[in-house]
């Protein structure tokens, strides 16, 4: 029966592997000279040939121009911010055109769901969410703003904060006061699900909360309690990350899969 009670977190991808393409690029190759530090915004997209033809012999032909079928900048945008009826449109569009989805950030469905499903929380505003526009579409003022264009980009201020060894950072990133953590870039250890859920619930915490409140967002209370404690209950990777490139953990052996009963 909804609303639901407390339950231990379940790692739905425990001991599964992820295909990874890892590249290492000097930051000086990402910024226009003579800048040594600055903010960049990036995203990735995937395309396929427009026409697929299934032959009578079971073979498949692909023809025509490339068509974009998915993209990713910030995590969980396609999954929880963009509604089902607009996912194909969002995936086929470019970040520079994201102003057309602005209302999905200012009046997020997830805020309404969180308020409904978890009555123990202090209800977060369900409209006028300029804080989410800043975090996800333009960059956080004083942290990683890339300009006035509203676009879903993973932003990184390469000159902000002091990076720590991979796997040793606080999983809450910027919410824990680590300016080298998500949403300023995205480290392997950053718990992006918990960070974004807390942001939607206006549970930014004692460090970031006052900054958000200074811009007039979250109805003057961006450190709602217990909203600043919500999460999925999965806080660490099952395997340690590597200390050298490519940093991702060694893959699990498929023939010894023990992730689920």
Image (tube, helix red, strand yellow):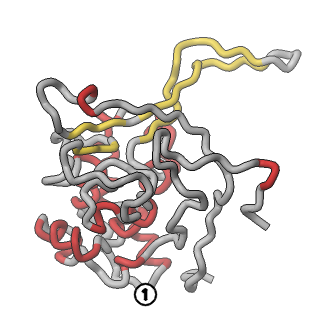
Residue at 77% over, 20% down: 54
Residue at 21% over, 53% down: 161
In which quadrant of the rendered view does residue 7 lie? bottom right
* Residue at the top extreme of this rendering: 64
Residue at 16% over, 41% down: 148
Name the spot of residue 52 as percent of width and height, x first: 68, 20
* Tag count: 1
Q: Residues within 10 Å of mark 1 (few under 14, many from 20)?
A: few
**Quadrant of image for the N terminus:** bottom right
Secondary structure of residue under mark 1: loop
Name the residue nearer the viewer: 13 or 147. 13
Name the spot of residue 40 as percent of width and height, x first: 25, 37
Name the residue nearer the viewer: 70 or 167. 167
- Side of 226 relative to 159 (left or right): right
Name the residue nearer the viewer: 113 or 171. 171
Name the spot of residue 173 as percent of width and height, x first: 33, 61
Vertical order, 201 against 155 (above or below): below
Name the spot of residue 120 as percent of width and height, x first: 43, 87
Residue 183 in view here:
no
**Quadrant of image for the C terminus:** bottom right
Q: Which residue was labeled with disc 1?
A: 120
Vertical order, 172 against 51 (above or below): below
* Residue at the front extreme of this rendering: 243
Residue 48 in view here:
yes
């Amino acid at each position: 029966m909804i609303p639901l009670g407390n339950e231990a977190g379940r790692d739905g991808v425990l001991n599964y592997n992820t295909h990874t393409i890892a590249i290492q690029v000097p930051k000086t190759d990402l910024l226009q000279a003579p800048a040594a530090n600055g903010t960049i915004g990036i995203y990735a997209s995937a395309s396929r040939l427009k026409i697929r033809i299934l032959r009578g012999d079971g073979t498949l032909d692909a023809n025509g121009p490339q068509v974009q079928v998915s993209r990713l900048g910030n995590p969980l945008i396609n999954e929880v911010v963009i509604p089902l009826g607009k996912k194909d449109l969002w995936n086929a569009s470019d970040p520079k055109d994201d102003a057309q989805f602005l209302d999905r950030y200012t009046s997020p469905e997830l805020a309404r769901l969180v308020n409904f499903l978890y009555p123990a929380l202090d209800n977060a505003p369900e409209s006028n969410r300029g804080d989410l526009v800043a975090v996800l579409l333009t960059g956080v003022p004083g942290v990683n703003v890339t300009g006035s264009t509203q676009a879903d980009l993973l932003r990184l201020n390469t000159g902000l904060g002091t990076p720590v060894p991979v796997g040793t950072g606080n999983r809450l990133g910027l919410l824990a006061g680590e300016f080298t953590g998500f949403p300023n870039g995205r480290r392997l250890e950053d718990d992006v699900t918990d960070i974004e859920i807390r942001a939607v619930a206006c549970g930014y915490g004692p460090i970031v909360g006052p900054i958000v409140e200074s811009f007039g967002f979250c109805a003057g209370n961006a450190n709602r309690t217990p909203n600043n404690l919500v999460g999925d209950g999965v806080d660490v990777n099952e395997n340690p990350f590597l200390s050298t490139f490519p940093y991702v953990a060694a893959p699990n052996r498929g023939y010894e899969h023990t992730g689920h009963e």
